[in-house]
Image (cartoon, rainbow, N blue to C red):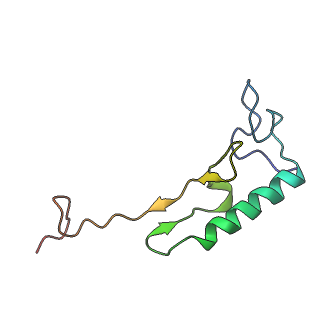
Amino acid sequence: MPKCVRCSGKKTEPCKVCDATGTVSKAETLRRLAILDLARDNESEGDLELDDDELVVLSEGDSNGCYVQMWKWLDYSGTPLDKEPS
């Protein structure tokens, strides 16, 4: 079975992904991949991007949805942080 991406079975308290066993069921793996596919539908190159599948953090609770860790690009142009001022 695949290793848990959250804890790798190293936690002493239960992990919501693998129950601290360090392995993830096939059903959980397929669910995770389906969530990542849905997130990719909302990805925007250069604006909102995902890392590789195994690095993405998902936070799923009892609500009808979940949080997906993604990268948001911030453009420094015209700000005090601008590295290439004109």
Instruction: Kindly give the residue lying farthest to the top in the view shown.
Output: 12
Instruction: Kindly give the residue lying farthest to the front in the view shown.
Output: 64
**Quadrant housing residue 73:** bottom left
Toward the viewer: 69 or 23?
Answer: 69
The spot of residue 75 in percent (x, y) is: 30, 67
**Residue 2 to residue 74: above or below:** above
> Residue at coordinates 64% horizontally, 51% vertically from top-left?
66
> Residue at coordinates 58% horizontally, 62% vertically from top-left?
51
The spot of residue 9 in percent (x, y) is: 77, 35
> Residue at coordinates 57% horizontally, 70% vertically from top-left?
42
Instruction: Kindly give the residue lying farthest to the left in the view shown.
Output: 86
Tell me if 34 is positioned left or right of 58 in this view.
right
Report the number of numbered marks.
Answer: 0
The spot of residue 6 in percent (x, y) is: 68, 42
Tell me if 79 is positioned left or right of 56 in this view.
left
The spot of residue 18 in percent (x, y) is: 80, 39
Tell me if 56 is positioned left or right of 31 in this view.
left
Q: The C terminus lies in which quarter of the figure?
A: bottom left
> Residue at coordinates 67% horizontally, 60% vertically from top-left?
53
